[in-house]
Amino acid sequence: MANLKEIRNRISSVGSTMQITSAMKMVSAAKLKKAQDAIVAMRPYAETLSALLQNLSAALDGETNSPYTLQRPVKKVLAVVITSNRGLAGAFNSNVVKESKRLNEQYADAQVDLVTLGKKGNDAYKNSDRVIHNDNAIFDDLNFEATAGIAAMLMDKYAAGDYDKIVLIYNKFKNAATQIVMNETFLPLEPQEQDAAQSGTTDFIFEPSQEEIVAELIPKSLKTQLFKALRDSVASEHGARMTAMHKATDNAKELKDRLTLEYNKARQAAITNEILEIVGGAEALAG
């Protein structure tokens, strides 16, 4: 009977776990809808702003004096590692950390420093002296103003020549089950070359001058790019956690069913043994 009690305890424990994972799945599903709507609504604006900046910059034929377009030999790299503050989201955080560590191979001849946004990324590098800044609180109330402050810090470091390249590493949201790990250049800005079709014959009149418009758009575009990456990461986190908790719930149900079957077999065997003992005792008395 001790074995039966142990199985009953395991069934109870698995049942409790299944309730928790199921509840977490539903919470993540509710949060995912809001986060997904936010990133889907933002993408057209961010992509249009980026395309406009690239076209204007290309039209200037390298005449812009912006420090953010200056290309330098890559000797120092700054990676912005965007993770979450919580776990239980499958490989969501570990994939980003792995990609950040791969930068040491990608830039083997350069020094790679880190800015971690999210507790899990900071935990992964807690014993490293390469982290120059970390911010775990940004996801508590994600807004453009807080993001703009971090983007301004990154822009200042690049403009001052502290780093020759700045990259963003984060999960891009595709759907609830799929997140794409991105290794995206933040700085320097690389104007997109226009092909013959894009260079067209349209003659625009710019007010103020084209150079002033580009100078005004660059900081706004960079801040928007970082904000989009953070929103992508938030939507990806909820999608990854919902998927992970769905799988965990299914696995718990399968384990509970298997334990229940094992319990019923053990209980049936115990009852059979008791009956045999009673019958054997009755025969002994009768004999």
Image: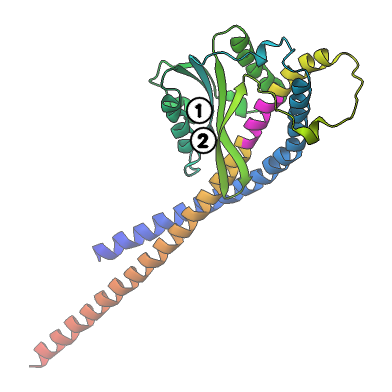
Residue pictured at 57% horizontal, 8% vertical: 161
Q: How is the image coloured?
A: rainbow
Examine the structure image and report whether residue 230 is included in the region drawn in magenta. yes
Asked if marks 2 and 1 touch (Cβ < 8 Å), the reply is yes
| Location of mark 1 (residue) | 119
Q: Position of residue 278 (x, y in %)?
A: 19, 83
Q: Residues within 10 Å of mark 1 (few under 14, many from 20)?
A: many
Residue stretch in magenta: 223-232
Q: Earlier in the sequence, mark 2 or mark 1?
A: 2
Query: In the picture provided, is 129 more to the left or to the right than 279?
Result: right
**Quarter holding the N terminus?**
bottom left
| Location of mark 2 (residue) | 86
Q: Position of residue 58 (x, y in %)?
A: 74, 23
Examine the structure image and report whether residue 134 is included in the region drawn in magenta. no
Q: Which sits in the foreground, 143 or 110?
A: 110
Q: Which sits in the foreground, 230 or 202?
A: 202
Rounded to the nearest angstrom, the CA distance separating label 2 from label 1 is 7 Å
Disc 1 marks a residue whose amino acid type is Lys
Mark 2 lies on a secondary structure that is loop
Residue pictured at 12% horizontal, 90% vertical: 283
Total tally of numbered discs in the picture: 2
